[in-house]
Image (cartoon, grey):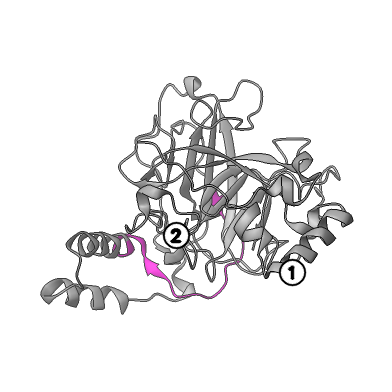
Amino acid sequence: MRFVSPPRNLNVAALFPGIERFAREAVRLHPRAGAPGTGESSVGGPLLWPSDEEWPTCSEPHAEYALFCLAEARERRTILAQVKTQGHAPTGALRARMYELLSREFPLSSVEAPVPMLPVAQLYARDVPGLPCPEGADLLQVLWCPLDHESLPYTAYGPDVRLRWRESGAVADPLAVYPEPRVIAEPYLVSPCAVYPETVVEYPYPQQLPVPLERAIEAWETEVDGDYAFVLALRKGVKVGGWGDWSLTDHFEIVCPECGSRMDENLLLTLGGTEGDSDDRWLVERDRGAHHADDVGFTIGDDYALYVYPCPASFDHAPAIVIQ
């Protein structure tokens, strides 16, 4: 299966001469509901994890939020998937069960620390062109704590993210069952999806460009009532590389606290819960009129995205997490 994004309706390089120097490739992953295995790239699928390696956990303070039992949240997702297939609202016993599950909230005091993290993505270098990996590694694994945190350096609320790179061939005895948290904030439950990578070209958010180009973009937007960032520059959804959005806070510098390297132009991963927007401009042709562009199931705030910026100097330094 192959997905192709719709072309831009304007030539960005012709509109803004010189911007081509800042073009970057990004890989849209186009996650779609599936049952991936540990030997495949996935979003929300199982991880190829050594049985003798400790599973990541979170001991940071967590923010108050409506919490649900993980098993019951998955049950509700299963019901919603059935309803989606049938094409009508739940009725009878299913409807009653949905209301029962929705009413079963848990308080923050029910969180048992440390909290086991949940898989978010697993990406093999063979599937994702240009995937950054340390020497000898061919696999990136992404996990997060499925609760809100108030202590993250660059965002008010959100999940805490961990990255693991490894050599897949060195995992001789994979972990069969990984630990899971009892309760979660349901927006951070990622549904298992296969991925269908597609390489696209992106351009920086205006504030990351030299002033003459930023002013040229502002003048064009005023003249034609246009939207450079979301119509011409950036793609939505889950993607590797490219450029990030800064529309919520404006662009700010991020410096690695361990070595002082600039991180805010070193985007590794974008985690957006949907590939569409108000007019579905970035939905691939296969999805127009369908409802598969939000199969990942997770939501970041009010339709925002989570951006992972690692340190360009060392894979061992903690990444910066930004929500925009």
Is 243 located above or below residue 100 in the figure? above
Q: Tell me the amino acid under the disc marked 2.
A: Phe
The amino acid on which the numbered mark 1 sits, given as a three-letter code, is Glu
Residue 258 x %, y %:
81, 45
- Residue nearest the observer in this picture, 86 or 203: 203
Please name the residue that numbered disc 2 is placed on: 298
**Dot 1 surroundings within 10 Å: few (below 14), some, or many (20 or more)?**
few
Which circle marks residue 107 in the picture?
none
Magenta segment boundaries in residue numbering: 57-73
* Residue in the picture at 50% in, 54% down: 282
| Residue in the foreground of this view, choosing between 127 and 182 | 127
Residue ID for mark 1: 223
Q: Quadrant of the C terminus?
A: bottom right
Query: Is residue 192 visible from the viewing direction of this image?
Result: no
Q: Is residue 124 above or below residue 6?
A: above
Q: Which residue is rendered at x = 54% and y = 55% of the image?
A: 236
